[in-house]
Amino acid sequence: MRRTDAAPGHGPRRGVLGLRRLAPYAGIAPFLAYLALFLGVPSVSVVTAAFEDPRGRFTWSNIHLALQGAYLVSFEKSLELSAWSAGISAVAGTIVAVALVSSSNATLKRLVTSASAVFANTGGLPLAFAFIASLGNFGIVTRALTGLGWNPYDHGFSLYTLTGLVIVYCYFLVPLMVLVMLPPVESLRREWFEAASILGARRRDAWRHVGVPALAPQLLAATMVLFVDAFAAYATAEALTNGAIPLVPIQIGTLIQGNVLAGQQNVGDALGLAMIVVVAASAVLYARLQRRTARWQR
Amino acid sequence: MAALTISQGAGASGARRSRSAASAGFRFGAPLRALVLVLTGLYFLVPLLASGRFALEGARGTWTLSAVTALVHDGSLWGSLALSVEIALGAAAISVVLFTPTSVWVNLRLPRLRRVMEGLTLVPLVVPVVVIVLGLYGAFPPVFVASPAMLALEYVVLAMPYSYRAIDSGVQSLDLHTLTDAGRTLGGGWSKVFLRVLLPNLRTALLSAALITIAYSLGEFAMASLLSFTTFPVELFQIGTEQIDEATAVSVFALVLVFLLLVALSVLGGRRRAARGSVAAGDVGVADEPARLLGASRGGGDGEVGA
């Protein structure tokens, strides 16, 4: 409100030395300051702390520590989890999007779109509890299967493993994928399919040589998004496994909660920096793919 | 965390195309389509139904409300809920006060910054929460980090991708220049125009933004737990480690509440659109939303993480 009061107005000769040209930016200064303070400062602090020892001197040792032993394992686990969940969700989400576009039922489409918007936002505790209630040791589905004579827990399955986490992560990643892929799937032109079939292509060929390549950039870009989403998730994994699977966010959480060795206070920051690097790399890749999409669409 | 999508109108842009291409092309036949949709439906509905059943299950398969009643008498749960509500209201208030003038200003005076702002507001989506928490401990004195106010201040940032968007789409759907010029011509000062002309027109948008922020804050677990605040979800987590059925009962209840909140939001959004008689400029289809969220996130994201 204050800002609108302080409007520079249309009156000329108000500012000195180009201040008048800068004045409009004053209107968003509080917003920028807020972001800088509560998002920028913490992020920068993590990056600098990653290169400092407890006394504030420059060191590489945090980075070295973060890239070996248990921490390296946590990276492998995190990457494995994110890659599997993103990959499976990308394929499943695209298939659902195609199935949805194939249907001429408008109500169904609206229903699924709305439901996807809701499900894409689940996560954390309710999601973990819902899966414990269905696929946990004493979950409803587990008991039903046991009743049928096949207890999944006797056959090497457990919800509290990486596989379990993949199943749970798909719950919010698949709907996200459906939402992202609906527009590109809808924009697959019928004419392309007809052209392919006139040229003698069977249904399968048309998909293989036209449909899939046309969707590929979008699909890969969206997969990067899912990957980042899975990679950064903390709450769901923590709630489900109680920290049993050493993912990177979980490791950082353990370090934050005070379980650090003397002299290694800043290892958490190094792990944080590594997370930032992974996310940034994915973002760059995403941008590349996105540009490619833009090139051929229209 | 996953992108919270504001459900406002289902892909209006897609409707035209899908109708024209409904007959053939890159489509599935009816049996395959049905199979895919039924399987997907099961995957999404079974955990929901299971948690409902789990919450209300008594000994030997009977139905009981005991898990629910046990919780009603749980004092610490109510205490944590009070803390969560306080934080949520604080975050919602700050969001509205900070974002509304910013959005109005950008749309009125700095329209060329619109894309930049869009990118900037999405940055929190790509910065992991654990990283922000690390940074808070590193950058701020312990006194600040130990105050619940910190949580509210951070929730403003974490919910920004959704709340700013809600406000901004409301602002964009207004004819800002006409409204402000009219107000000014009639002798209103800037503050008067803002308070008496713009704000009443933005009621629904502000309400949406506030509700989204509240929903986010009430459900956020990672940051609260890492900053050692016993908010509602953190308390729920602790109950869950001992009494999973009770915890499930509450979480089902909370889930239903949030669901109702989201439904209310889309109803509000629908009514606003209906009242205006056309699709407002800022309203993007649900289907476009995540793509746009993410499309814009790269610019801001790079700048942020590179810092």
Image: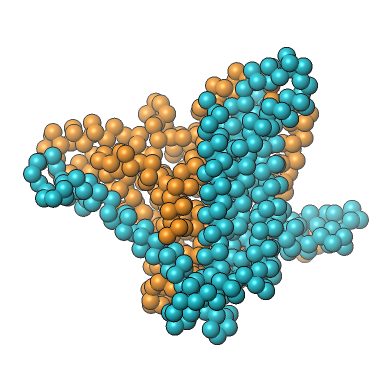
Chain colours: A cyan, B orange
Q: Residue furthest right?
A: A149
Task: Locate the N terminus of chain B and report the quarter of the image it occupies.
Answer: bottom right
Q: Residue B190, percent across and down?
A: 17, 44
Q: State which quadrant residue A174 falls in.
A: top right
Q: Which residue is painted at 81% across and 57% down in the image? A: A142
A291 over B21 or under it: above or below? below
Looking at the image, which residue sits at the far left? A13
Q: Is residue B165 left or right of residue A164?
A: left
Using residue A275 as the reference point, say whether residue B62 is left or right of it. Answer: right
Residue A189 position (above or below residue B105): above
Residue closer to the observer: A288 or B179: A288
Horizontal and vertical percent position of residue A127: 64, 56
The residue located at (49%, 58%) in the rendering is: B127
- Residue A211: percent from the left, percent from the top? 68, 29
Q: What count of labels does the image hold? A: 0
Q: Residue lying furthest top in this view?
A: A198
The answer to whether any part of residue B48 appears in the image is no
Q: Residue at x 55, y 45 (%)?
A: A286
In percent of width and height, residue A265 lies at 52, 79
Find residue B177 and report its image quarter.
top left
Foreground pick, A185 / B218: A185
- Residue drawn at the location 55% of the way across and 80% of the way down: A264
Q: Is residue B26 visible?
A: yes
* Image quarter hosting the C terminus of chain B: bottom left
